[in-house]
Amino acid sequence: MVAPVPEDEERCRLHSGFLRRPFSTPPEATMAFPHLQQPSFLLASLKADTINKPFAQRCQDLVKVIEDFPAKELHAIFPWLVESIFGSLDGVLIGWNLRSLQGRVSPVEYSIAMEFLDPGGPMMKLVYKLQAEDYKFDFPVSYLPGPVKASIQEHVVPDSPLYHNKVQFPPTGGLGLNLALNPFEYYMFFFALSLITQKPLPGALHVRTSDCAYFILVDRYLSWFLPTEGSVLPPLSSSPGGPSPSPAPRTPAMPFASYGLHHTSLLKRHISHQTSVNADPASHEIWRSETLLQVFVEMWLHHYSLEMYQKMQSPHAKLEVLHYRLSVSSALHSPAQPSLQALHAYQESFTPTEEHVLVVRLLVKHLHAFSNSLKPEQVSPSAHSHATSPLEEFKRAAVPRFVQQKLYLFLQHCFGHWPLDASFRAVLEMWLSYLQPWRYAPEKQPQGSDGQARCVSERWAPFVQENLLLYTKLFVGFLSRALRTDLVSPKNALMVFRVAKVFAQPNLAEMIQKGEQLFLEPELVITHRQHRLFSAPTLTGSFLSSWPPAFTDTSFKVKSHVYSLEGQDCKYTPMFGPEVRTLVLRLAQLITQAKQTAKSISDQCRESTASRPFLSWLGFCLSDTNSSYPANDLDDMGQDSIRKTDEYLEKALEYLCQMFRLSEAQLAQLTLAMGTTQDENGKKQLPDCIVGEDGLILTPLGRYQIINGLRKFDIEYQGDSELQPIRSYEIASLVRLLFRLSSTVNHRGLAMRSQGVCASGGGDPRTAAQPLAPEKDQRP
């Protein structure tokens, strides 16, 4: 007998919280009415609960649903649940607003959300439950980062294993493309993209990022899936029978045999991708770690301009893309369009937020700790063996294989597009964190004598050389920014100090210089070494004796790094060459000028405090219109900030002199050449200008000096001191009244004096003293 479906539907809707697993619709009803299946009732009831029930009750209901329902019924609610948590991809729905949720503001909601989304919590149990059944979920390509979207829409799979065998091409065009993702990938895609697609609420501008639920969840996911100690924990079983094996995808994203210094080709990866199903099961234990890192990198760091996207494509990758495009076009029986046509349609003006940069810095710091947790015997390339676990191989390949290139492009984009203000500190600290992996190593660097900075060990020389551009080219980019900022500001002075301090660490400059020398070696030597490295052994004699020595050509590594990031036709500017040295000298000049400016502002502050008029004690704000220096944040922070600025600039100048071996004589000569000496009164000289027909004309240097507050024209009132314009801190009506009173007193005094002179016969009244002030009120 067929049960009445409307009654079943009503019972499911009224089932409060799904405290026990509801009865399912009989098979006869499902066959007779396929559109009235149990998942539709479940989804409708959960959607209704979002309006009718509080947050805590809804989460309790979801926990029961995840525990009681089978994967066949849960897969229908999974996309809706993910979107309701992280918000919609178009940013309209904000979801749980994890980026503004804080424990000290909303402790109950915070603890419930964190427990539900924890790596070992109910939401992950749902993911693994669906993963075990090999469900797939469609993710629209239109919400991917711009370069990836432009490439896929042209039927070109990006050079990332994350997209292989997942793109679903429609038969008629490039619109409506989707990625077929497994539940873990689908969840992580939404989680990572919510950092970019969700706009912060107006009240969230003053929220501290490190206290928010999203930031802490990122840290928990990184610690869980990229552990620095032990191995990745297996997923918890949702059944009471005990732990289940890790549900690996049917086709692993990438075999670990292809990890290493050199990228394998797309064609090779496609072949290995299809044949690796029966590979070593041990590699399945870290597929979640690999997927997590790839998703975070692709979603957070894959935003840059079209020119950068074209530059990063190596000739080998371009050839493979061309081959793939030709095969796709022949399959569709249509001519292949030029790749630039689709890419030119991508004109994404992406500007990352400060919160975005802070999360990326968290990723960078954890990756350094993750990579540095390798056992000592497994760090050197000679220790590689087949016995090495997949997790150890992944630790060795995580940064160079997945992160280095995209992080470099992301930093370049930030250096070129970030506003010239103090918010650049977030980008700066993220860059400096990547440049110092030794800070996150288990063993600490030995402390220098007399409290000096720790010496960078030679162990890190390969990292410095294989990341040469992130040290040298980005340092030049920072110099160009520093030359355009107001170094009198304490926050800007602190940034210059931080960079100079990091690069002045003992032995670091020598490592960078050694890397530049390896890159600038003649090509003939590299060709010979490359032939020696990659040639096969001869068949005569012993196999071991005929094989080349087992060491890596560092010069070839450095060249490969530079060419992979900048292309074969790049024009490299040495960091210790004459061009950069000139920029450093200009920065040293500006530092000297800024120190003098800060000292002059400090002197003026002390003078104004000592000669403070009576009205200032009544609460009126005074400002000196005759001051030679514009207002900045020094005026708001007082003498402590001026002292800090002087200390930051003094130490930064000292560090720059150590790095580039600048002598005191050079600094003194440059100071005089820039005209930074003070005159007899301690005031700055006029801005640089030339004399024209109509007076003084500012030069580009003079305009730069005025914009940055280094110099200013002395604009003073030259008329009668009694007739100065009324100040903003004065009471205009009272000033005018007192001026009329004084004028009347002066006029009457003059008249009485004139009468006295005439009465005594002392002369003509016209020869009497002139009045002290005009009779009429000439003040505005």
Image (spheres, helix red, strand yellow):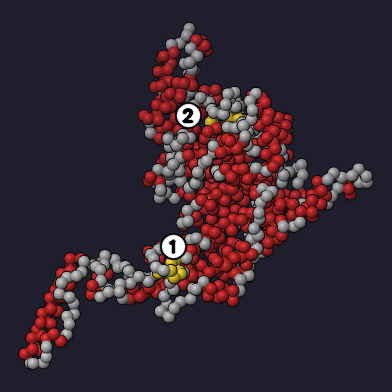
Q: Tell me the kind of residue under disc 1.
A: Ile
Q: Residues within 10 Å of mark 1 (few under 14, many from 20)?
A: some
Nearer the N terminus, badge 1 or badge 2?
2
Q: Residue 277's x, y, as percent? A: 70, 30
* Residue 294 visible in the current orientation: yes
Q: Position of residue 25 (x, y in %)?
A: 48, 15
Tag 2 secondary structure: helix
* Front: mark 1 or 2: 1
User: Who is closer to the viewer here, 559 or 461?
Assistant: 559
Q: Position of residue 103 (x, y in %)?
A: 43, 46
**Which of the two residues, 348 or 773, is positioned nearer the viewer here?**
773
Q: Is residue 648 left or right of residue 449?
A: left
| Rendered image quadrant of residue 60 | top left
Furthest-left residue in view?
Answer: 759
Residue type, numbered disc 2: Trp
Q: Which residue is drawn at the image coordinates 43% and 67% (left, top)?
A: 697
Image quarter where the C terminus lies is bottom left
Kindly identify the residue that appears in the image at 33 percent across and 76 percent down. 610
| 188 in relation to 379, above or below | above
Q: What residue is pinned by disc 2?
A: 80
Q: Going 17% across and 69% down the picture, which residue do you hit?
A: 736
Under circle 1, the secondary element is helix
Residue 655 visible: no
